[in-house]
Amino acid sequence: MNSSFNVVDFAIQLAVILFAISFHESAHAWMALRFGDPTARDLGRISLNPIRHIDLFGSVILPILLYFTSGMLFGYAKPTPVNLSRTRNPRMADVAVSAAGPVSNLLLAFIGVPVMYLLRRSGAVLGDSILSPLWYIGYQFLLINVSLGVFNLIPIPPLDGSWILAAAFGERVRLFFHQFGRFGFLILVVLSYTGILGRFLTPVIVGIFNLIKRVIA
């Protein structure tokens, strides 16, 4: 259990994750539209408004649970509806739409790297009173987007990793994940509460983040 709790830190992290989740789901919807399916767009899911994307468990309960069990804060939003029958090349659309969410978060982290580099180099001009809070927000922005991108690649429904595999390997794998998906929420709760999820993800996230820190150092 995370014994230290700072309201400001938690609020900043929660604000960042809500933005990251909204961007993630908008990427799914945008990619579906690029392949010819306007379903998600027509439901207003190409939006950075988190209210359009929030899932009670994935966006509220799971992030809080993870924060107090592992000190990490990430989650997922309600699934973006996609009608593959309305797309051009449904198999390719399925792979691209499924991967768009995690890729979008890793892209945000990639975009954040030069911003953080410039912040560090401008420290003498900005001063610590301005630089420190900006640096902290930027640090959380990078960490949460890397974490969210990696987290959603886990092949447990409803996470994107399961649907990427299903799209790549065909109907049998998709059927398996649909059946397995009934237990996905329970499995994520158990893995989160026991800290197993954090222990599995932390080395991957830390490895990626250490590479980023070398660039911005």
Image (spheres, rainbow, N blue to C red):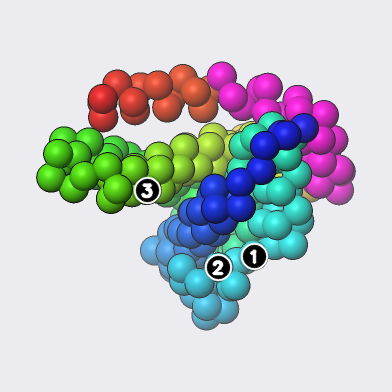
Q: CA distance from mark 1 to mark 3?
A: 27 Å
Q: In the rendered structure, which segment of residues is drawn in magenta?
A: 181-203
Mark number, residue 50: 2
Q: Residues within 10 Å of mark 1 (few under 14, many from 20)?
A: some
Is residue 120 shown left or right of residue 21?
left
Q: Which residue sits furthest left? A: 125
Does residue 42 sit above or below 27 in this rendering? below
Where residue 168 sits: x, y (%)? 57, 37
Residue assigned mark 3: 133
Which amino acid type is shown beneath numbered disc 1? Ile
Q: Are marks 2 and 1 in contact (CB under 8 Å)?
A: yes
Instruction: Determine the secondary structure under disc 3.
Output: helix
Give 95 or 187, whichever is nearer the viewer: 187
Where residue 3 sits: x, y (%)? 73, 34
Q: At x 55% / y 68%, what residue is drawn?
A: 50
Residue assigned mark 1: 54
Q: At x 34% / y 28%, what residue is drawn?
A: 212
Q: Are marks 3 and 2 in contact (CB under 8 Å)?
A: no
Give 6 or 148, whichever is nearer the viewer: 6
Where residue 200 sits: x, y (%)? 66, 22
Mark number, residue 99: none
Which amino acid type is shown beneath numbered disc 3? Pro
* Sequence order check, earlier mark of 1 and 3: 1
